[in-house]
Image (cartoon, rainbow, N blue to C red):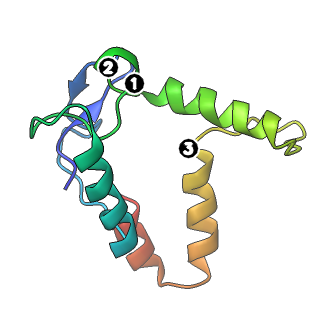
Amino acid sequence: MVERAVKEGGEIGTPKSGEARISALPAKAREVLEWWRKETPFPEDDCLVFFGGQGRPLNRRTFGDILQRALRETQIETGNRFLTTHSFRHTYNTMMRRSIPADTLRALVL
């Protein structure tokens, strides 16, 4: 359950809706996150798994910059599209729409 989120300025608060969210997570992803959490230099229980420079939280701009650099380095042609990390949500929805009922998909992407 996601109860805290990183805001634009780097501060930590509630998700946009103000309510906790449930995120489906495959077992392998959970295993990797648990391993990663053990490797963090910030061992306190309330510290972040993903952190930026000087222990600051990563934010959406950080991931956007990484995505744009990866697209350039892999020479993936984006044409006139501006891809963001949010684009993966749309891709996931499109791909899963063929595999699972609409009400189940809505519940997964709340």
Mark 2–mark 1 contact, CB under 8 Å?
yes
- Local SS, label 2: loop
Task: Name the amino acid, label 2.
Answer: Arg
**Viewport quadrant of the N terminus:** bottom left
- Distance from disc 2 to disc 1, alpha carbons, whole Å, reads 5 Å
> In the displayed structure, would residue 27 be above or below residue 81?
below
**Residue 63 at x, y = what percent?**
53, 33
Residue to which mark 2 is pinned: 56
The label shown at residue 86 is 3
Query: In the displayed structure, does residue 90 sit left or right of residue 60?
Result: right
| Viewer-side residue, 98 vs 11 | 11
Residue drawn at 54 percent across, 54 percent down? 89
**Residue 96 at x, y = what percent?**
56, 75
Residue drawn at 39 percent across, 24 percent down? 52
| Viewer-side residue, 86 vs 50 | 50
Q: Earlier in the sequence, mark 1 or mark 3?
A: 1
Task: Name the amino acid, label 1.
Answer: Gly
Q: Quadrant of residue 32?
A: bottom left
Residue to which mark 1 is pinned: 52
Q: Earlier in the sequence, mark 3 or mark 2?
A: 2
- Distance from disc 1 to disc 3, alpha carbons, whole Å, reads 20 Å
The label shown at residue 93 is none
Task: Name the amino acid, label 3.
Answer: His
Viewer-nearest of discs 1 and 3:
1
Residue drawn at 40 percent across, 18 percent down? 53
> In the displayed structure, would residue 2 be above or below residue 49?
below
Mark 1–mark 3 contact, CB under 8 Å?
no
Residue drawn at 32 percent across, 50 percent down? 36
